[in-house]
């Protein structure tokens, strides 16, 4: 909870509204104090991954600041964080798509260059974001296969949740 609150504060500060960051962090802390701390919910474990990934993306230097190497590492690390979050609960993959759209928005405004340059940046940075989730999913599936439980892994993560997904349509 502490990491998420601090990251929400830093996000607000990065966006130019440290007061909004304070409010978001405090509200997150207060609203997370349910069930008297008796159980840890997946949401509490996933939230630091998402907020840190979002902070890494939004605080990355822009291409015109000439810090391409720093941007690459930030997007790779953000992708790994999102990959950990997806391993916590695959449903959060939709949240990761939203983060990808925010990254797309972050790449567009005020950036010099043509549409082709924007598409190259988008494909390049999008690929960096995808490396983490794909790598971690592959490692987890590979580990499950080595243990002889690949069928259970696939069933638990893709087949069993499908009735719930259909219920929300």
Image (cartoon, helix red, strand yellow):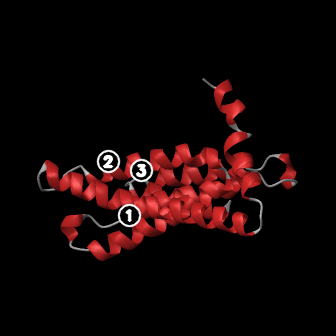
How far is mark 2 from mark 1, CA to CA?
13 Å
Dot in front, 3 or 1 = 3
Task: Say whether disc 2 or disc 1 marks the residue closer to the N-terminus.
Answer: 1
Task: Say whether disc 3 or disc 1 marks the residue closer to the N-terminus.
Answer: 1
Query: Residue 60 sits in which quadrant?
Result: bottom left
Classify mark 2: helix, strand or loop: helix
Residue in the picture at 59% in, 60% down = 137
Asked if residue 49 lies left or right of residue 36, the reply is left
- Mark 2 and mark 3 in contact? Answer it, CB < 8 Å: no
Residue in the picture at 69% in, 48% down = 157
Residue 18 rendering spot, x and y as whole percentages: 45, 56
Residue 66 rendering spot, x and y as whole percentages: 21, 73
Q: List the residue tagged with mark 3.
A: 100
Does residue 40 lie above or below 3 as drawn?
A: above
Q: List the residue tagged with mark 2.
A: 105
Task: Say whether disc 2 or disc 3 marks the residue closer to the N-terminus.
Answer: 3
Of residues 83 and 107, the one drawn nearer to the viewer in this rendering = 83
How far is mark 3 from mark 1, CA to CA?
15 Å
Q: List the residue tagged with mark 1.
A: 59
């Amino acid at each position: 909870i502490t990491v998420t609150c601090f990251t929400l504060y830093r996000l607000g500060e990065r966006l130019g509204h440290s007061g909004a960051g304070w409010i978001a962090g405090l509200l997150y802390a207060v609203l997370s104090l349910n069930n008297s701390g008796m159980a840890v919910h997946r949401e509490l474990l996933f939230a630091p991954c998402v907020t840190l990934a979002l902070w890494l993306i939004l605080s990355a230097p822009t291409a015109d600041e000439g810090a391409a190497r720093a941007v690459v590492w930030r997007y790779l690390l953000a992708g790994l964080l999102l990959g950990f979050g997806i391993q916590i609960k695959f449903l959060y993959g939709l949240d990761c798509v939203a983060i990808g759209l925010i990254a797309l928005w972050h790449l567009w405004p005020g950036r010099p260059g043509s549409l082709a340059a924007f598409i190259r940046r988008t494909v390049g940075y999008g690929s960096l974001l995808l490396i983490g989730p794909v790598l971690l999913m592959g490692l987890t599936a590979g580990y499950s296969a080595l243990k002889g439980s690949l069928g259970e892994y696939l069933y638990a993560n893709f087949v069993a949740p499908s009735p719930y997904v259909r219920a929300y349509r």
